[in-house]
Image: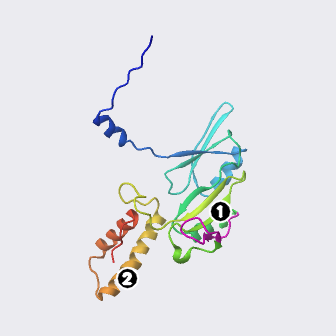
Amino acid sequence: MSTTATHPKDATTEARVGKIDMKLEVITLPVSNLDRAKEFYGGLGWRIDADFRHGAERAIQFTPPGSQCSIHFGANGTPGSAKGLFLVVSDIEAARDDLVRRGVEVSEIFHYAAAPSPFGGQVSGVAPGHQSYGSYATFSDPDGNGWLLQEITTRLPGRLAGDTTYASVPDLAQALRRAEAAHGEHEKRTGQRDADWPSWYAAYMVAEQAGTELPT
């Protein structure tokens, strides 16, 4: 006769488990030709992290600019079956133009009638006022795996964990431009020059990333 002992979790264990991060860092994309996939994604300007061989086995990994998640290409699975892979950008028009310049076939920019929610049917052009989360464009790799560009400039509350960070120089530059424009409106309202503009910029950028009320 066998028995299975169970032990109640103490408060220390519960607290420790609750604080374990689970960071999505790599996803596998099924492709039919590794060399073709390597050429395509290298042409996008993505960073190649690995191209390992061991006998007949091979592993290739790329990382999109500014991304904390990498893409591992695998021969398992059905090539082209991955759909709706989101690539978040701070300027969708610039991102689309860059892809077109690299020879990628990209859809026109569109938004949804009920933007920023993905409902109400697609409408041509960027979301009114470049509403954050509202503008999209799509493209596919040679196997048909589908990517979706989405423009996000201001995060919803609770969507950013940890300190205020920016994944790339362009993202930081865009954030500074938005802070500059908002600060200009602030000075117009007050009717005087704000000598401590760095503190105002910092408060604006932190609030924008955290999704809290922006300073005025």
The span picked out in magenta is 105-122
The N terminus is located in which quarter? top left
Q: Residue furthest front?
A: 1
Q: Which residue is mark 1?
A: 138
Residue at position x 61%, y 60% in the image: 148
Label drawn at residue 184: 2
Q: Could you tell me residue 87's position as x and y percent?
A: 56, 58
86 lies above or below 214: above
5, 100: nearer the viewer? 5
Q: Residue furthest left?
A: 195
Secondary structure of residue under mark 1:
strand
Q: Is residue 43 visible?
A: no
Main SS of the magenta segment? loop
Q: Is residue 200 magenta?
A: no
Q: Amino acid at mark 2?
A: Gly
28 lies above or below 175: above
Q: Quadrant of residue 85?
A: bottom right
Camera-nearest label, 2 or 1: 1
Q: Quadrant of residue 211?
A: bottom left
Q: For marks 2 and 1, give the CA distance.
A: 35 Å
Number of other residues with Cα within 10 Å of mark 2, as a class: few under 14, some 14 to 19, many 20 or more: some
Residue at position x 33%, y 86% in the image: 189
Q: Could you tell me residue 82's position as x and y percent?
A: 65, 49
Residue at position x 67%, y 66% in the image: 100
Q: Could you tell me residue 44's position as x and y percent?
A: 62, 58
Q: How many marks?
A: 2
Q: Amino acid at mark 1?
A: Thr
The C terminus is located in which quarter? bottom left
Q: Is residue 121 magenta?
A: yes
Q: Earlier in the sequence, mark 2 or mark 1?
A: 1
